[in-house]
């Protein structure tokens, strides 16, 4: 099979790039030829493989993320018009091209986010908020065109599937393949908190995410922390231009909140905390939650997160309202005060995660590609 993957990047990391990475690995292991059409990074362990060709349209010197996306899409469209017929299967991610493709993997539906009451422009009535609205609006238009131009839409969660149906795409065109988890990288283990500058003799929860905006809902976690005085919180993610370090001070919980910045060793940090909290306001999947589960942590998340579909009452707590701070307080208190429950739930969480290995998900994609060839 001659497979073409059109995407921003192919590497271990965020959800979209990781899916591309795992599909590529599975494809070459079966002897398929893969052409990667990218604008950013390709994992080093994939480079140089004789079955992989890389077409790199580097646009990183172009100012603003939006302009880089526009230029990359134009370059991809021209390239596919010229070379698309060479491939058995063309897979794209989101609004990356308006040309005909066989599969489009949908990680985010901008039309849904645009209408969310929590969209940045509804919170930040300034130039940044206006830019975010314009960016989302443009992407919502582009992605609809891209989705119409493909044979099969792969939704990475049931949440995404329902959102696609709501914006007019037929259910029979949509398949669901959940994101996987690296069961070797994310696994229970014992480490010393001191190596991360974290206190040892305290109850410690973990939050991981981009909290420069309000979507991940760190503000509710900080507010809830006020009423859980025997709990500390480790926060992983860039705090640059984020209002939340200041909010922690205003709430007088800053002595219990440990901002660690962006970290590449999240898997190791997950091995030193007691549980994971991620009450996102809008989350098409939420791979970090399944990674926490694989690490043997009980999790707190919200029903709007796609990953909530795999969180059972035995493995975590799913909040039905992301704005109900008292419900979040109750969940934090339960897991803080009952260490024996945390252990039991953590074991259940790991068992669930083991059903969602990346190998199984990548093979599901390969099976789909093969079916489209026949």
Image (cartoon, rainbow, N blue to C red):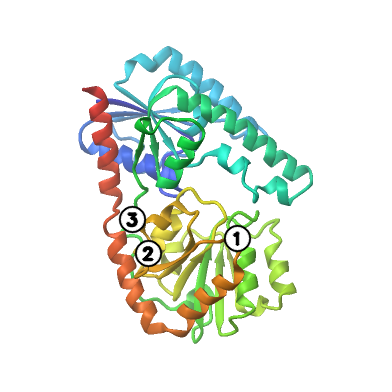
* Disc nearest the viewer among 1 and 3: 1
Residue 189 visible in the current orientation: no
Q: Nearer the viewer, residue 71 or 135?
A: 135
List x then y, in percent, for residue 22: 33, 43
* Disc nearest the viewer among 3 and 2: 2
Who's the residue at 64% across and 78% down the image? 226
Q: Nearer the viewer, residue 132 or 318?
A: 318
94 to the left or right of 341: right
Query: What kind of element bears circle 2?
Result: helix
Reading the image, the residue beneath label 1 is 217
List x then y, in percent, for residue 39: 51, 32
Q: Which mark is on residue 113?
A: none
Mark 3 vs 2: CB contact within 8 A = no
Quadrant location of the C terminus?
top left
Who's the residue at 59% across and 35% down the image? 60
In the rendered image, which quarter is residue 130 located in?
A: top right
Reading the image, the residue beneath label 2 is 293
């Amino acid at each position: 099979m001659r497979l073409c993957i059109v995407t921003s990047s192919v590497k271990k990391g965020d959800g979209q790039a990781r899916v591309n990475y795992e599909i590529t690995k599975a494809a070459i292991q079966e002897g398929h030829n893969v052409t990667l059409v990218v604008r950013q990074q390709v994992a080093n362990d994939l480079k140089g493989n004789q079955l992989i060709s890389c077409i790199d349209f580097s646009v990183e010197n172009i100012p603003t993320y939006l302009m880089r996306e526009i230029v990359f899409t134009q370059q991809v469209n021209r390239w596919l018009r010229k070379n698309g017929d060479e491939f058995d299967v063309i897979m794209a991610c989101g609004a990356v091209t308006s040309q005909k493709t066989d599969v489009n993997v949908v990680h985010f539906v901008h039309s849904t986010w645009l209408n969310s009451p929590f969209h940045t422009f509804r919170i930040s009535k300034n130039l940044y908020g206006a830019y975010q609205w314009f960016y989302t609006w443009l992407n919502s238009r582009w992605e609809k065109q891209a989705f119409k131009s493909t044979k099969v839409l792969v939704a990475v969660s049931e949440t995404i599937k329902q959102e696609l149906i709501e914006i007019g795409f037929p259910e029979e065109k949509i398949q669901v393949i959940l994101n996987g988890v690296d069961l070797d990288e994310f696994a229970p283990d014992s480490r010393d908190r001191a190596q991360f500058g974290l206190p040892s003799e305290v109850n410690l929860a973990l939050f991981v995410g981009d909290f420069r905006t309000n979507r991940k809902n760190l503000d509710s976690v900080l507010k809830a922390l006020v009423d859980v005085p025997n709990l500390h919180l480790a926060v992983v993610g860039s705090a640059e231009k984020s209002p939340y370090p200041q909010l922690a001070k205003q709430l007088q919980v800053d002595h219990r909140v440990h901002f660690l910045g962006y970290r590449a060793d999240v898997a190791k940090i997950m091995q030193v905390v007691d549980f994971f909290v991620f009450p996102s306001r809008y989350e098409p999947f939420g791979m970090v939650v399944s990674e926490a589960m694989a690490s043997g942590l009980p999790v707190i998340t919200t029903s709007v997160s796609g990953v909530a579909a795999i969180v059972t009452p035995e493995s975590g707590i799913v909040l039905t309202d992301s704005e109900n701070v008292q419900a979040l307080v109750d969940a934090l208190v339960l897991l803080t005060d009952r260490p024996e429950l945390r252990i039991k739930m953590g074991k259940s969480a790991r068992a669930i995660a083991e059903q969602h290995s990346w190998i199984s998900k990548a093979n599901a994609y390969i099976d789909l590609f093969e079916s489209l060839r026949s």
